[in-house]
Amino acid sequence: MWKKALCVAVLALAVGYIYHFDAGLPGAAVDYLSESLRDLRGTTSVEQRLAAAWDAVIVPPVKQWTKVAVGVNACVDVVLSGVKLLQALGLNPGDGRDHEVLRSRADLKEAFVHFMEKGAAAERFFSDKEAFQAIARAASEYPGAQIYVGGNAALIGQKLASNPNLTVLLCGPIGPKLHELLDEQIAVPPESLQEVDEFHLILEFKAGEEWGRSRAPSASRFIFSHDVSNGAMNMLEVFVASLEEFQPDLVVLSGLHMMEGQSPETRESRLREAAASISDIPSDIPVHLELASMVDRDLMNNIMHQQVFPLLNSLGLNEQELLFLTQSSSGPHSSLASWNGIPDVGVVSDIIYWILQENGRTEDGRGSDLTRVHFHTLTYHVLATVDGYWANQVAAVAAGARVAATQACATEDIDMSRVVLKAPMEFTTSGSDDHVTKISFNPLEPVSLWKRGTVTFHYTPVLICKDPVRTVGLGDAISAQGLLFSEMAQQ
């Protein structure tokens, strides 16, 4: 048995070497090693074969990041069952309805039910400060409520800090409780420290959970807050100013969605200021933006076309954000009201390609520096890059998918008894009549690749945790892990 395991390990390393160091080697070499892995598959499950194949291709980049600066939204998360909190607040089940801004407990209940029935994640601003504080007290005192590091930037920083060879700078509104919770390896500029923490309430629901007539098709969470510091992105200028001394290899930004709680006039002015600050980041430092749930189409459209996207190198987002982005800008498939179950791979690919064509490098080399989009949904991931700008992306997308399984189940390694594969095994690469290729997924070849113009797409399934311990921050962990295995190609 040990001899067979050793052979698998050696072959895995060989395949990883070929994927990483010379994608141009003769196809026969890759085919030979892939065939050898197939011969050793035995009677293992499809999930086990996929996990073993990931191990074969997840190899570190030649040039790894040494210093990463992350900003600018950070908070303390209070995590608990959404249904139990609403019951504790004296609310009864009823019909769901989305609200762009929450103004009352009734709005909170309706919005929670709306997204619970969809099995989708969402985030909303609660406008009434006193009402929010009362709900926050009830949540933090509820038996079983858990307190964690929160905010996309802080969560990404925490994940990056798990790499002992990486120095991480985190800038955001960091109060005493959050500072206590942060990894010791994370450096915090003194200007980021404040006397009071910002709290976000995360109402989780499980797959199949019921409340009244409502039933959740999949596990996810509903987030809400009355967050003034993050909403104004107060720490953005402090963050950019700190880069000169820190000298990072990579900048990761998040928190733009928090501006939705402001008036349209204030938000528009602040977005212009934010774009001006981001443009001050030296052009030789790649910038990644992590999007989050939004409801204001004007804000999203301004971020994409007028303000931020032209300043980026990389973008991370999920299915809700991808669809809202194309709806806001009348992009491909913008008439689609919502995803019907698992997002169609071809439709996702069309929208990603449009994003890169609108805001990235065109085939003749013109345009901005946006050359990478990392899309993640529950069942699969797609990482698309403009050719010539990024390396090691096979490893990056596989590493992101692997961490989704371990983080959701709160295990160091994938526990095969707790994961299941639900990704489409056959799909087309476009939702339109053009550029369509049909792909049949083979778990022994864990990353499927296809090209469209100068854009290469990388697809891999996710091993879904059947009993997730915590869903908050999963997208942030996925993007962070994908970035850890990425490198900018030499121009």
Image (cartoon, rainbow, N blue to C red):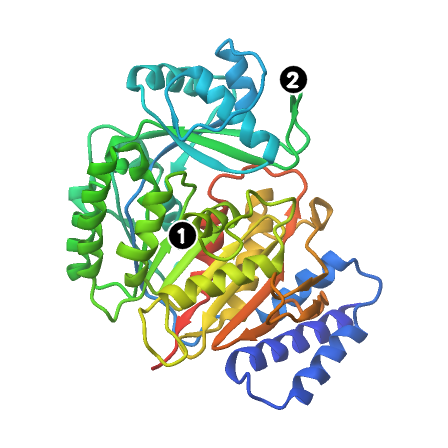
Return the residue at label 1. Answer: 329
Please state which amino acid type lies under the numbered disc 2. Answer: Gly
Residue furthest top as drawn: 90
Q: For residue 33, what is the image quadrant?
A: bottom right
Q: Is residue 428 left or right of residue 194?
A: right
- Residue 167 image point, x, y percent: 31, 58
What element does badge 2 sit on? loop
Q: Is residue 244 above or below residue 221?
A: below
Q: Is residue 481 above or below residue 78?
A: below
- Residue 263 image point, x, y percent: 24, 33
Q: Is residue 263 above or below residue 187?
A: above
Q: Is residue 133 left or right of residue 40?
A: left
Q: Which mark is residue 212?
A: 2
Identity of the residue drawn at 58% across and 58% down: 347
Q: Which image quarter holds the C terminus?
A: bottom left
Q: Which mark is residue 433?
A: none
Crowd band around label 1 with a 10 angstrom C-alpha radius: few (<14), some (14–19), many (20+): some
Q: For residue 487, what is the image quadrant?
A: bottom left
Please state which amino acid type lies under the numbered disc 1. Answer: Ser
- Residue 17 image point, x, y percent: 56, 80
Q: Which image quarter holds the N terminus?
A: bottom right
User: In the depicted view, which residue is nearer to us: 93 or 14?
Assistant: 93
Q: Is residue 424 left or right of residue 122?
A: right
